[in-house]
Amino acid sequence: MAGRIFLKGNEAIAHGALAAGCKCFFGYPITPQNDIPEFMSSAICKAGGQFVQAESEVAAANMLLGAAAAGVRAMTSSSSPGMSLKQEAISYMAGSDLPGVIVNINRGGPGLGDIGPSQGDYFQSVKGGGHGDYRTLVLAPATCQEAYDLTRLAFDLAYTYRNPVLILGDAILGQMKEPVTPAKPRKENPKEAQDWCLTGAKGRPTRLLKSLFLDDGALAGQNLRLKAKYEKMKAEIRYEAFACDDAELVVVAFGTIGRIAKSAVRALRAKGRKVGLFRPITLFPFPSAALAALAAKGKRFLTIEHNLGQMVEDVRLAVLPAADSDFFSVLPGNMPIPDDFEKPILASLKGAAKKTGAPGKATKKAAKPTPAKAAAATKKTPAAAKIRGKAAPTAKKPAAKGKKG
Amino acid sequence: MSEKIVFQKPESVYDRATHYCPGCHHGTIHRLVGEILDEMKLREKTILVSSIGCSVFLYNYLEVDAVEAPHGRAPAVATGVKRARMDKFVFTYQGDGDLASIGMAEIMHAANRGERISVVFVNNTVYGMTGGQMAPTTMEGQKTTTCPSGRCPESHGLPIRMAEIIASLGGVAFCARTAVDTVKNLNQTKKAIRRAFEVQTAGTGFGFVEVLSTCPTNWRMTPLKANERIAAEMIPYFPLGVFKDADAEVCA
């Protein structure tokens, strides 16, 4: 096995895709995800695959649909405004049971927003995103290694469930450089998708991949089949629980914000405060049962997000009525550092924070710390870390299967 | 006494009645496509990308593998299919609302990239399935449900001539406009679709055929009157012919 390589999060995703046997990549420029199509434009061709710079994100996502129909591992990537355009194809893919991997390196919004980090696309990612009643699996990496590992996993999940899988990162993850330990490239499974994909009807009945169901009861049947599939996906729930066992207050945060919050939690632990971190790795399906179990033990919760409060709704749904969750908001355009989170965590620990939470002000002084600085703050592997759920975000132990709460 | 078969359905066409209105040309064009798939022995390596509109149900009539594309996106979906499986035969079948309005970006760029796909474009100057609204190809003065007084160029522009536009793009190997209103034109259409398929199998480039077609229901005409309208009104504005044939001498 090759040694560690020094990669940006965006590149780690691209490397992960190649290691997973991705054969087609369809891209379109948008900041801050450009490293992915730029890297893929040559790398995937060297690997014997195909790169297309599409005319739009709409077209790129529909190309993904086409490659998926042909049963070939394929990916597209974008950032928030582009993700809005991809939703049409994602809905059709969900409705037609087509697998594919879609990467969103979240930037600020709404509208053109900015090009900095944000978690404003949480709702769009986990509640469907396009039209109709559907869900996509959503994986939220917090480190470059996890970005690499979860991208590999995303392809397996897409083909296991015949469903689109989203990787939800942000501008911090995409632009941050870290060492990544690569995995052995996947051995191709010649049987994958062969019982449903389109190859030309040679010596077998024709196949049809569609999302149109006009006959009486047909669409209801398809909706119920999809529902059953989403239920099965609960077997894939992954999360990181750090110092939660004896914690009085559990901080809930995902992605890079989860990682920054972990540093704050570690610092407060060092000061003897009983706080823990719960970091959902699968945002859909959401680790509701694991949170409910913590709530049943009498823990209090504080959700921290890089938005005005989106995941906090899912946290509350999970922990109510045994508990509720406070909320602390970091606004897009700001780069938080661990120190910014200590005050709100202590306030929640005292039970003093308002339930709705106010947008964080502490970020002003943090002006513009580099992503590297924020990452460095979380660099050490904590002895007290307890990884539950499937994904251990360390290089050595990728994706151990975890508890389904 | 032996029987002599003089007429048969192509192997690539299912033996079933279509949902199309009387006098609609879709059924005729479907059959031509089926005949060519048979003659070129392509049926078992074909992947059809169907579009949105009346012809979304093409997969009920052609016995080939098929995937349903969102409205206008068939050329993008076909790009994905073809790039994933370069050895397969991939074609789209699209109407004028689908291809020349909502799907304008996808058709232009697939053609310009020279994707090795073929496109059958059926132009009947109206949105058929949704009930006869104005299309980008609706003729000047033609009445539709969204231009009840007739298409007015001052507010709606002039009908778009797709074949001429597509022919101007670099990646296109074959581009023609035909009709199926007469036996002669029908034969020309078959030849053109065959060439649009051949440039794909030869790996030369993008193949495109625009077929002028009727929509008697939404034109509020009898099938006969609708058929007559092709020559009387459409062909003068949408001239028939081959606009590009990159290597006619090679494949002729």
Image (cartoon, coloured by chain):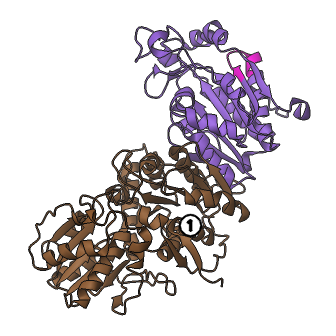
Chain colours: A brown, B purple
Q: Quadrant of residue A222?
A: bottom left
**Image vertical order of residue A47 relative to residue A387, above or below:** above
- Residue drawn at (73%, 63%), measured in percent from left and top? A46
Say left or right for A212 vs A181.
left
Q: Quadrant of residue A19?
A: bottom right
Where does residue A245 sit, x and y in percent of width and height? Answer: 24, 89
Read off the magenta span: B177-187
The amino acid pointed to by label 1 is: Glu
Label 1 secondary element: helix
Task: Please tell me whether residue B252 is drawn above or below residue A163 in the rendered image.
Answer: above
Does the segment drawn in magenta span residue A344?
Answer: no
- The residue drawn where x is 47% and y is 75% is A146
Which residue is pictured at 63% across the width and 29% down the height?
B121
The location of residue A98, given as percent across then percent down, is 52, 57
Q: Pointer 1: what residue?
A: A11
Of the pair A59 and B72, the residue shown nearer to us: A59
